[in-house]
Image (spheres, rainbow, N blue to C red):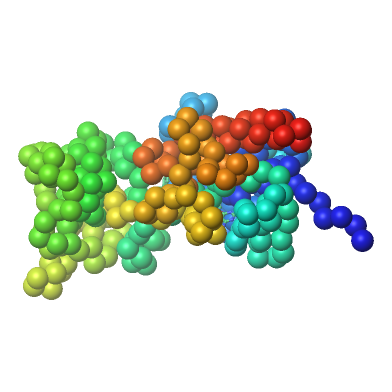
Amino acid sequence: MSEEKVENVVVFGSGPAGLTAALYAARANLEPLVYEGVEPGGQLMTTTEVENFPGHEDGIMGPDLMDVMKKQVARFGTRFILDECTSVDLSQWPFRYTVSQGSGLAKTIIIATGATARYLGLPNELRLRGHGVSACATCDGFFFRGMEIALVGGGDSAAEEASFLTRFASKVHLLVRRDKLRASRIMQQRVLSNEKISVHWNTELADVLGQNEVEGIRVRDNQTGVETDWTQIKGLFLAIGHKPNSDPFVGQLDHDELGYLLTAADSTATNVPGVFACGDVQDKTFRQAITAAGTGCMSALEAERWLEARGEH
Ligand SMILES: Cc1cc2nc3c(=O)[nH]c(=O)nc-3n(C[C@H](O)[C@H](O)[C@H](O)COP(=O)(O)OP(=O)(O)OC[C@H]3O[C@@H](n4cnc5c(N)ncnc54)[C@H](O)[C@@H]3O)c2cc1C
């Protein structure tokens, strides 16, 4: 009977974090194996223009950036499989992992499964993602210079993003489902004292108007049920949270109360030696392609050093 192959490095995820990890691991002759997951290329596949990834003077479309990143990684012999991790057994080494189509063994695992921004789920909201609807104020605020925009949410992120968006928008309409904000007192004060922010209490998004881009929104007063169209709104932002894609790992790796994987300071090492986590699955603060790529690089370098220290590389 032939012995089961043990991979040096298995990467779960093919967003900026996973692909950068694979790039470094491949150039270190570790022949990484990447499981791409159900969203090959990750979150940037859902957006249009990316203007803040260094090296692209005129900006680049999100899917084009991920395409060129993948080609660069493939050049050094990385293997890609279109499948996703369903569970891992980290109590044994080499580690055992299971994907939908089977299972395998790995000496090191890099988890780069990202996070999923929450949307309300309205058909037109989802259809116009990247065309005026965004879940990333840092990424897309710049495109709405001098325009009126709306932001949905009532927590700290919503308050912070509303303030941030006033740098660009002429007016930010904050739609709050309840009659108060969940945000901390200091953030509330900042929002309520900002003349460019109008807070609309007990107000919910009912629909997004427009064929190819946002041409307005329909809002509902949840006390009276009355719906109104606001056609002056040209951009819609959602700040209702993110869900880290950490389900297959949470039983075995330390995580916070939201499911973000915990890593050591100045490192991407998890609490299990030989398992590393990078990108949005462990970062709820920055959530940018460049920071995801940066931590992906760290994971690969740490995996290489870990293998070397054990005489495995
Ligand atoms: C609308 C939008 C616009 C954005 N615009 C910008 C921008 O302009 N600039 C910027 O810097 N950032 C932007 N971001 C943020 C950026 O996309 C993320 O910070 C970045 O993609 C995170 O990279 P990641 O590799 O950690 O995860 P992701 O990009 O989320 O990729 C996760 C990967 O993991 C895979 N996966 C998930 N579960 C599993 C599993 N169980 N097994 C195997 N694989 C799995 C998925 O298929 C996917 O390939 C934007 C985000 C959104 C939502």
Q: Is residue 296 left or right of residue 156?
A: right
Q: Position of residue 99 (x, y in %)?
A: 66, 61
Q: Residue at x 90, y 57 (%)?
A: 2
Q: Position of residue 302 (x, y in %)?
A: 61, 32
Q: Quadrant of residue 18?
A: top right
The quarter of the image holding the C terminus is: top right
Q: Is residue 121 left or right of residue 165?
A: right
Q: Residue at x 9, y 70 (%)?
A: 223
Most extreme residue toward the bottom is 225
Q: Position of residue 6 (x, y in %)?
A: 77, 49
Most extreme residue toward the right is 1
Q: Residue at x 49, y 56 (%)?
A: 250
Q: Position of residue 102 (x, y in %)?
A: 72, 64
The quarter of the image holding the N terminus is: bottom right
Which residue is more in the foreground, 198 or 288?
A: 288
Q: Is residue 305 left or right of residue 175?
A: right
- Whether residue 72 is visible, yes or no, is no
Q: Is residue 59 above or below residue 183?
A: above
Which residue is more in the foreground, 97 or 192?
A: 97
Which residue is more in the foreground, 308 or 197?
A: 308
Q: Is residue 102 above or below residue 42?
A: below
- Whether residue 216 is visible, yes or no, is yes
Q: Quadrant of residue 145?
A: top left
Q: Residue at x 42, y 42 (%)?
A: 283
